Every structure is written in structure tokens, then in C-alpha cells.
Image (tube, grey):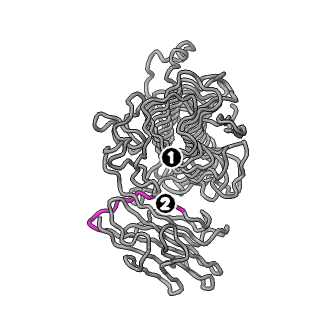
Amino acid sequence: MRLRIPCAALPSPGSQTMHLSGVLSGEPRRGLALMAGLGLMMLASPAHAAVSHLYVATTGNDSTGNGSSGSPYKTILRASQAATPGAIIHVAPGTYSASFLTTKSGTATDRIRYVSETDPATGARARIVPPNTTATTGIVWENRGAYVDIDGFEFDGTGTKMPNALLNQGSYVTISNNHVHHIANGSNQPCNSGGGSGINIVDTAIPGLMTGTVVTRNKVHDIGYNCKYIQNIYISTRATVTNNLSYNNTAGAGIHLWHDAHEVVIANNTIYNTWMGIIVGGGNYYEYSGPADYVDVSNNIVVNNDYGISLQGATGSHNTYTNNLVYQNTHYHFSPGANHTGTVIAPPQFVNAAGGDFHLAPGSLAINAGSPAFAPSVDLDGNPRPVDGLHDIGAYEYGGSTPGQVLTFWEKDSVAGPTSGYWFKQALVNGVVVWESDVTADGTAWQSHSVAINPTGASFNLQFRLISKAGVSNYPISVNIDDVAINGVTVTNAGFETATGWTYAETKTAFTGSFDTGAFHGGAASYKLFYPGATLSAAGDNSTVSQTLQN
């Protein structure tokens, strides 16, 4: 089986057609007759296999564990090796440093399911990170099994260079509810035609038979760094791509079709702040003679990109572009040759795009402007579509339910070095950590974060904390916080522009807290938590700035 790594070619000077190569997935909408002719249609339904449950935890053991809840395995790879059709592999919250290949297949009636469990208190899920911070090639998780589900994982490449998070080469695979971010996103990331992606669906060496892949309800963002070869979502065969939120890739594409991509549905995705929003194209074929045909692009929001919906390479005559909302795409909304209908050209009116909330606000022209033809039955939140008989455009259906509360904020710290494991920055709600990052993980630039929170009661306490987890000296550290927002909640002095609204506390007098007019994201100030390098810290030393908010 040949591994397909996406590649791309530079645009020709002076040409509007940019021959880029990439990898994306497709699903069979018109291939049933072919499958029947090959004798692959099932004439009778087999009996279901017994459902088995396997467990993985960071405290498990691959040698002595048996995969039970009381004696879990330590790695997803070990659990996959023990899986049989019908198995559900439960992966406990925690951080798993790994690069691995899964090959076991389920059946049409008894799929193998990899499921991340969720911490009910914090919302944390199984977090998979590259094992090597310097490796510039490789894949975090490659799957070659068929009839497989991969659901609910976080892929976090912060501070690493491995260019591929999740790569699938199996048929009838569903990739859903995953959060893929900061893959190949460092400022010193190599850029070459080997490419990379957040989610990568590639064709196998079996001609024309890879099919049935579904990529749905994933959040993919901050992928690549000034490299046109690294994309958020790549498809190079047949697939269905729906209800995905894809943003922040200023040199790559939000969704990119190339190689053998055909018979693809791209519907109800939201794409924001990329170089190319959606690329539909074929070329550099592996098993298929092209072109990229029978591609349906419907109900997508494509906003604030350099290019909107772009046709590249070889495209067929049966492609459709219906009921998409396009706006503020610098060079064009559609490339020449894209015959589109039902297009809305207007601001999407997101609730808070800067804070990562891409739900539709009241009055958005995306509401009730979609087509039912390719619309999925639920939205990114899992709410039913449509609510009132008319479909909306984008990943979120307006009025499906009241979105949960989301904390958004900007932060930066003063550490760019590799000495990790000592100082951490955190956000807490009622004393529970809802967000955390090592100060060494993300450079020194301002970063935006969005965190789902579910505070109960009439009021709750919001806190930002700088904390030492191991004693260290000669390690001065500062963390700045700015532009705090929570939907449905009033935050006093959210931008720290005046000395009001917030309360500072510390566990050691060496800490200081101050309104900082020398560093800010917006306005003219932020709040700085500081610890001097001359004073030895101890594990647990911390300082906080907090506010009690009315729910």
C-alpha cells in the first residue's frame, strides 16, 4: 500500500489557474452500480459480532494490562492490535505522545470504533501530540483499517513540526468530532512539496475502490505556517465532507481536493481566514484517470480568504456550486468557470469570529438560505437540521439550540525557549482548570483561545493564573491577558483598560500583578502576571487575576 503525501505546485506567474496538488476524501454517490458489477454488494445481512470494549488510559500498561476498565492498555496502538470487529476502544482523557499506525478492520455491520472519553468536570478529552518536537516528517495517527470510526480526539501539534495529524487510507471510515490544531504551525517550520495536513484522506493502491469516507463535525485550525503545501483538510478520493469548521491557514487551503478526488460532497462547512477557501481540482493521478467530477459544493460559508472557491487542474462538467455564502475573499469568490447558483454575497454575521465562535448571529443572511439537496441531518453541534423547515448555510444551524457559553481571551508570555515543565498559564472557572498551556509551547506572540465552559448558579468566578509546577530559578516569566469575553455574560473591564473590575492575588510576595500599558492585544493595556528569575519558585506557587461574574 503506497502512502499518499499531498504535494503542490506553485502557481504559474500571471496565471489565474494555480495547479496545486493535495489530498482529500470522497464518498460513493454514483458508484453503486460499479460495486455491484464487481460483486461487492452484500446479498444477505450477516449476524452481528458480539460488542467488545477495550480501554486505554495514560496510567495503563501495554505489557501487563488486558484492556479492561480495571487494567487498561497504555496506548491506542496496543488496543487496536487486540480489537476485533464490533470493538469499541475507549480512550480516557489525558495526553498521549505518539506516532502510530492502525490496521484492523471492522465489517459493514460491526465497525471498530475509537472513541475519546470526555472529563465531565473539565471537558478535557484524549489529547494526542507528536512524540518528537523536532521531527519534520511523519504522521501522528495513520489508519489503514476499513469500517472504522475515529471520534472525539484532540490532535495538538503545538510546539512541534510533524506535518500530518490524522491520515486515513481505509474505506468506509468516519472521522468525526475531532479537534485538530497547531499542526506544522511553528515559525521555523520547513516548507516543501512533501506537504502535510490536519486531516488527510488518501486513495489506496486498489484502483478506484476506496470509498465511503465521511469527514464530519471536526474543528481544524491553525494549520501550517506560510507554506502552501500544508492544508487543513485534504481529499484525494471519494468522500463526504460536512459540518466542519476550518480556519486560520494563511498559506494553505481550508478544504483541498486533488489527485483522484471525484464524487465528493462538500456541504455546510465554515471556512475562514485561509489562503484558498475550497479547492476543487484533479491532477497527478494515482489510480483514477480524472477529472475531478461529480463534486457538489453546497451550503458552505467561505469568508475572509485570499481566494474563495477555486477550480484547479482538471475539473468535470457535472460539478455543482449551490447556495454558498462568500464574502471578503480578496481576489475572487469563485474562479472563472464555476457556474454557481443561489450564492449569497454578504457578511455572515458570526457571533464572535475573533474569539472562535462561528455560530450565526440574528439577522445573518445565511439563515434559511441553504439548499436541502446535500445538507446533513444535524449541524456541528449535533442539533437537527433544519429547525424551521428551511436549511441554513454554514456549519451551524441557527436556532438549533442556544450555544453553550464560550470563554474567549487573548494571551502572550515572555518565554520562547525549550525549558518546559516549570511554568504554566491557566484559565479557571470556579477553581476548575478549563484551559492550560506550558509557557514554552507557543512562542511569545499574542494567541487567541476559545474554551467551552458550563458554569452553574447565579454567579461564577473566572480566574487567570500563572503557576509553577516545579521549583526553578533564573527563569523570569510574565503572562499577559487581554480582551476577555463570554457570550451571554458581561465582563467588567474586559480589555483591562482601567484599574477596575479585577482582583489580584498571589501565594508568594515575589509575584507582581499590574495593568500593563506596554503590551496589549487591543485597546491600550492588558493585565500582566510576573515572577522574577532571581527568586527560586516552588511547585504550587502562583498568582491570579480574577472576577466574579453574573451568569
Which of 458/98 is in front?
458
Confirm whether residue 54 shows in the render: no
- State the residue lying farthest toward the left: 458
Residue under the point 51% across and 57% down: 94
Confirm whether residue 211 shows in the render: yes
- State the residue lying farthest toward the top: 37
- Determine whether 329 is above or below 456 in the image: above
Instruction: Give the quarter of the figure containing the N terminus.
Output: top right
Residue 229 relative to residue 233: left or right = right
Q: Please tell me the numbered disc located at residue 328.
A: 1
Q: Position of residue 185 (x, y in %)?
A: 63, 54
Q: Please tell me the numbered disc located at residue 449.
A: 2
- State the residue lying farthest toward the front: 14
Q: Does the stretch in magenta take in 464?
A: no
Q: Which residues are magenta?
A: 447-459
Q: Position of residue 77 (x, y in %)?
A: 59, 45
Residue 8 relative to residue 272: left or right = right
Quarter of the image where one finds residue 10: top right
Amino acid of disc 1: Gln
Which of 379/56 is in front?
379
In the structure shown, which secondary structural element does the residue marked by tag 2 occupy?
A: strand
Residue under the point 43% across and 49% down: 358
